[in-house]
Image (tube, rainbow, N blue to C red):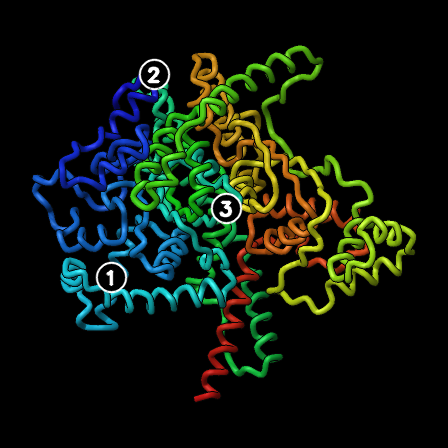
Amino acid sequence: MATYHSVEDVIAEQILPGEPINEQGKNKQLLRDFTSRSEGRLVDEFRGMGRFLGRRVAPWHALKEEGTHYSEDELDILDYFFGNPRSNVSSVRDSMPGDLWGQLAGQYARATIPARDRLLEIAAGMERIDPAMTIQNIAYAIRRSDTNFLDVFSVVAGLFVERYGINYGHASLRDSGTIRMVFEGVSQRLTKLLEFERVGAYQEQSTRAIPFEAENLAIPFEVRGTPFEDRFAAYGAHLIGLYNRALERSKEWFHGNLHGLRDDANEEIASRLRAAGVDSDRVIRSKEWDGVIGAAAFDVARMLIPQFMTTSLAVTLNTRRFQELLTMMQSDPLWEAQLIGRAAQIEALKVSPTLMKYGDASQYQVERHERMAELCDTIMEGSSLQPLSFGEFEIGSKLVSATRDLETRLLASALFSDSTGEHSFADIVGRVASLDQDERRKIALTLLEGMGPHDEFPHALEVGALVFERTYNYGAFRDLQRQRGDRQQWSRYGFHGFTMHPMFENVGMRDEVVAAMHLGRKLYVDLLAAGHKNAAEYVAPMMGVVQHVVTMDPRQQFYQAGLRTWDQGHEDYRRIANDEVAATLRRLPAFQGLVRFDPATYRLNRLPEKVNSIVQGEIKKAQKSQEA
């Protein structure tokens, strides 16, 4: 790999100067007038810190082996929908129907290929619906500016969005925005920056969909060409070996010790179908059982994935929020963030050339990062407090502070929101404060009476705040940070401890996993000593510890409880969500029993979801049979 001496070297390698302007290039001249910092274009096969994903598009003179390059027809289709299909970072053109974007973004969680390849798969499948809709004919229509073919795309994509975005409750598929962009081959570390803005839609590739292999690891730019490059690669290879053993041993352990749960689940299926009047002998099939076991084993093994493993995600934001995101990224100390931020700005200019000119780095933000880091070190050195000692941590969340008389203010807000305005909020607060517990309970019951599973909690609950400090791992943080309806603060990524999944003990791997954590800690400390503070942020695996402070109003807290405590979730973040809703309800006794959450512990957390899926499928099949 090349050696980089500054972030400017990184940017210069993958971002070329703007193309010369001729008299016919008025639109390009307009772009140049809007901004100087974003002037330029991305190299073919722009990759970021990871590798280029998808089929090859360059060099153009290369011998094109079948299946390795896009055809001219395919490139015409991709160019119609994407601002730059020759790049891991690309805007999405306005020509892409909203439903089609919803399908592409929604499938990221389980997709193993980039969005452009998935779009071509969808295009290739159109021929089954309309024999005239071949790849060649779609490309021909595009070249003739005939957009009637979009109707078929919209119908097919609409069916997907209706099924998964509406019927199955994945509401984020229905979000829309002005800037739509794909970021592919970026590090796990970078995802938390890309998903930072609260008002946005984010669909990220699940760690299950990315093979944990050496080719999907990305060495930080800051240490390429130094001895640390080999140490990163060696550490990644060591974790890959542990990951593969943990995955296989966990599967064996689950199969050998939990087979009785399959019998219990089959009995539950039969009982629920009888109760529904459905005559069916449906049971969990072997492939389905293997899937449940595989998911549980992956939840164990994934804790070994480091932050320099790559992933992909689709982002939908309005232009103002995207502009703020670009400024934050280009002001961040990480070289990867600055490169991807600059690339995203160049691509966003193709969609919104006016607003995106303001997405440059902020000197204030750059200097603030440096000033505050130095000040924190100075202040804490002058205290008697000791830094966290590296080792194993317990997962948990503690309530740091809460609004005084929170329940009184919450109940008063419920009354005030539907009042005629004859009384001030302060007067209602005073009256509620004088009520006994039964009367207070009546307000809460009346507010939430008849609320269904798809109804949102009333906005009247957006009063006051609860502040929690979470101690958990990067894997759980990766999932819970996506809430974004709350307000969040976390420190730069460190490696100050780790959590330990009990399965590592069960399969006899605890000692070697602990040793791997200390090996990573040594790499982290050595990077700091050598002045590579930025690169050190990529070292921690998913089981590394992070401190995370969140501030939520009760409405957001109740929403989180209903979303993040259920059986299909990872046990680590379920523990955090359950800790927090329990602490909240202790402050709000009038709401006890009125908020849906699931404090149970599951030996196979994906099994109840599979049982429900089978039961609902059989009931629906029986209903269709009766209608026929």
**Residue, disc 2:** 227
Q: Is residue 226 visible?
A: yes
Badge 2 element: helix
Q: Nearer the viewer, mark 1 or mark 2?
A: 1
Q: In the picture, residue 98 is in which quadrant?
A: bottom left
- Crowding around mark 1 (Cα neighbors within 10 Å: few <14, some 14 to 19, many 20+) is some
Which one is earlier in the sequence, the residue at label 2 or at label 3? 2
Question: Which amino acid type corresponds to the residue marked 2 in the rendered image?
Answer: Pro
- Crowding around mark 2 (Cα neighbors within 10 Å: few <14, some 14 to 19, many 20+) is few
Residue at mark 1 to residue at mark 2: CA–CA distance:
46 Å
Q: Is the N terminus in the top left, top right, bottom left or bottom right quadrant?
A: top left
Query: Which residue: 37% across, 26% down?
Result: 220
Left/right of residue 590 with respect to residue 502 in the rendered view: right
Question: Which amino acid type corresponds to the residue marked 3 in the rendered image?
Answer: Asp
Question: Which amino acid type corresponds to the residue marked 1 in the rendered image?
Answer: Ala
**Residue, disc 3:** 299
> Between residues 475 and 291, which one lies in front from this camera angle?
475
Q: In the picture, residue 214 is in which quadrant?
A: top left
Q: Is the C terminus in the top left, top right, bottom left or bottom right quadrant?
A: bottom left
**Residue, disc 1:** 123
Badge 1 element: helix
Horizontal and vertical percent position of residue 36: 30, 28
Horizontal and vertical percent position of residue 58: 15, 39
